[in-house]
Amino acid sequence: MESVANGAERMIQSVQRAFALIERLAAAPDGLRLSDLADGLGLNRSTAHNLLGTLEVLGYVEQRHRGAPYRLTGKLDQLLPPRVETELALRARARPVLEEVATRTGETVYLAFAAGDHYLCSDAVQSTEPLHLTVTPGEREPLLGTAIGHALLAGNDRLAERLAEADPKGWSHHAQRVSEAREQGFAVDEEGFHPGVSCVAVSLPGGAAMGVAGPASRLDHSRLLAFAAVLRQATRGLR
């Protein structure tokens, strides 16, 4: 049986790769071609093709015709309908709040949910400033190292525990930031993850977080703290 060691645990590599394909497709509503999936995950194209073929037979992935992009079917949604319904409901309720915060801050504001060891952007309102950060639904970033990720971890102890076990080295590097986010009620990233970009975020119920991000030249520390207060006030009705 093919497996790889990961600390004290062992993971079956083929299962790990299959879920990596599923997560990549979940972040691409329009689908991805075999070459993009394989190259993006560092997989041999033959291996990726075989895994996708298995997922297609099982009903989790579809390809309308040979050479077309692969897409997820609705089968995964059927497995966890309460979570899906909760996220859709929160997204609908959060939309007016996103617009309000974007108006009050002048920066890009976005809603995200945890997805494995990453977060997935669910909705966003872009800044109207000529120089701004563009965040689009479907984008993924790591939980560790990002303000949105740290806010999600601060608001979900079980998620934090799982990530600490899966990536002890990464966790040890960012644990203090997560702890600070838990104590303060918001997380801050000042050019720590993307050079030239700063962000502040707060956690929300349902495994979600909302963040404000933009050029670090406009978002100095004092402004990030002011935006944290705006976020906490605006999201009260979502808690």
Image (cartoon, grey):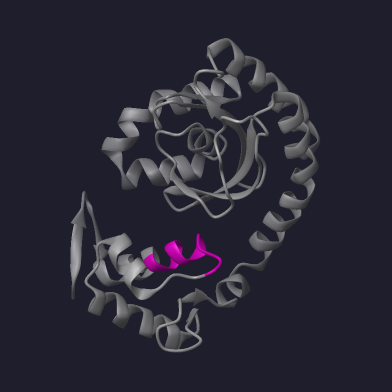
- Please state, as top left, top right, bottom left or bottom right, where the N terminus lies in the image: bottom left
Q: Which corner quadrant of the image does residue 133 belong to?
A: top right
Q: Is residue 203 above or below residue 208?
A: above
Q: Please state which of residues 123 and 77 is positioned toward the viewer in this rendering.
A: 123
Of residues 106 and 14, the one nearer the viewer is: 106
For the C terminus, the image quarter is top right
Q: Residue at x 45, y 40 (%)?
A: 160
Residue depicted at x 51% and y 63%: 28
Number of marks in the rendered image: 0
Q: Is residue 187 visible?
A: yes
Residue depicted at 32% across the width and 60% down the height: 40
Tell me where residue 96 appears, x and y as whole percent: 80, 41
Q: Is residue 158 magenta?
A: no
The quarter holding residue 146 reads top left
Residue 32: x percent and y percent?
44, 70
| Whether residue 62 is situated above or below residue 170 in the rendered picture | below
Residue 98 x, y percent position in the rendering: 73, 38
The answer to which image quadrant residue 19 occupies is bottom left
Residue 239 visible in rendering:
no
Classified by dominant secondary structure, the portion drawn in magenta counts as helix
Q: Residue furthest top?
A: 222
Residue displayed at 54% across by 40% down: 156
225 or 134: which is nearer to us? 134
Q: Position of residue 43 (x, y in %)?
A: 24, 67
Start and end of the magenta stretch? 21-30
Say if 39 sits above or below 94 in the image: below
Question: 235 and 161: which one is in front?
Answer: 235
From the viewer's perspective, is 79 left or right of 144? right
Q: In the image, is 38 to the left or to the right of 30?
A: left
